[in-house]
Image (cartoon, rainbow, N blue to C red):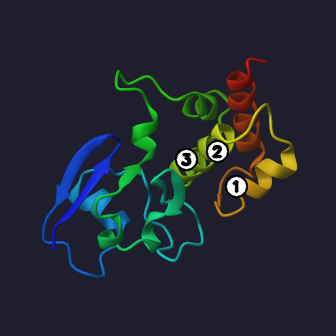
Amino acid sequence: MRVNVTVNGAPMVADDVWPGESLLYVLRERLGLPGAKNACEQGECGSCTVYLDGVPVCACLVAAGQAEGREVRTVEGLASAGGDLDPVQEAFVECGAVQCGFCTPGLIVQAHSLIESHDGVPADAEIREHLAGNLCRCTGYEKILDAVRLAARRKAGL
């Protein structure tokens, strides 16, 4: 089947998609967007988190056909057209919240979602709850929390 989808603001087409193929596979292997990572393929780790029509989802759990005619925004699409990183991406780099990098794209998308939907700086408990579906095996999460707080403070102008 053919899947027509808007990815990071650009219309894209994936051909010869088989019915059980995931959105994650289409993004990575057919459309050349390797940002979302393929880790558990069960929606447990969050490494493949992308926006689907503005809502964060695990791309490994979305059948590619379900994305037909919809909008997807990946971690690559958070950066500006000129290549400037999104403030959340910048904060992750500045705070050293990136180690092996496998969980980073999903965490950044999920943190971006929290910050965009929140006024001010969310409490630590709220940050932890929002990121609960994203597993990191390297950092111990403290630097990730620091990055989310930093990005939220910057967005709030603090």
Is 117 located above or below residue 58 in the figure? above
Q: Residue 111: which numbered mark, if any?
A: 2
Q: Is residue 53 left or right of residue 106?
A: left
Q: Position of residue 130 (x, y in %)?
A: 72, 55
For the residues labelled 2 and 3, say whether their Cβ atoms are less than 8 Å apart: yes
Q: Residue 49: which numbered mark, if any?
A: none
Task: Give the total of numbered labels.
Answer: 3
Image quadrant holding the N terminus, namely bottom left
| Amino acid type indicated by mark 3 | Val
Q: Tell me if residue 102 can be seen.
A: no
Mark 2, other Cα within 10 Å: few <14 / some 14–19 / many ≥20? many
Q: Residue 131: which numbered mark, if any?
A: 1
For the residues labelled 1 and 2, say whether their Cβ atoms are less than 8 Å apart: yes
Is 11 located above or below residue 129 in the figure? above
Q: Is residue 27 left or right of residue 131?
A: left
Q: Secondary structure at mark 1?
A: loop
Q: Is residue 130 left or right of residue 124?
A: left
Q: Residue at x 55, y 34 (%)?
A: 89
Mark 3 highlights which residue?
109
In the displayed image of the protein, which residue is found farthest to the top? 157
Q: Tell me if residue 3 can be seen.
A: yes
Tell which of 1 and 92 is nearer to you: 1
Which comes sooner in the sequence, label 1 or label 3? 3
Q: Is residue 28 left or right of residue 51?
A: left
Q: Position of residue 17 (x, y in %)?
A: 19, 72
Image quadrant holding the C terminus, namely top right
Q: Secondary structure at mark 2?
A: helix
Q: Quadrant of residue 77?
A: top left
Q: Position of residue 92 (x, y in %)?
A: 62, 35
Q: Residue at x 71, y 38 (%)?
A: 148
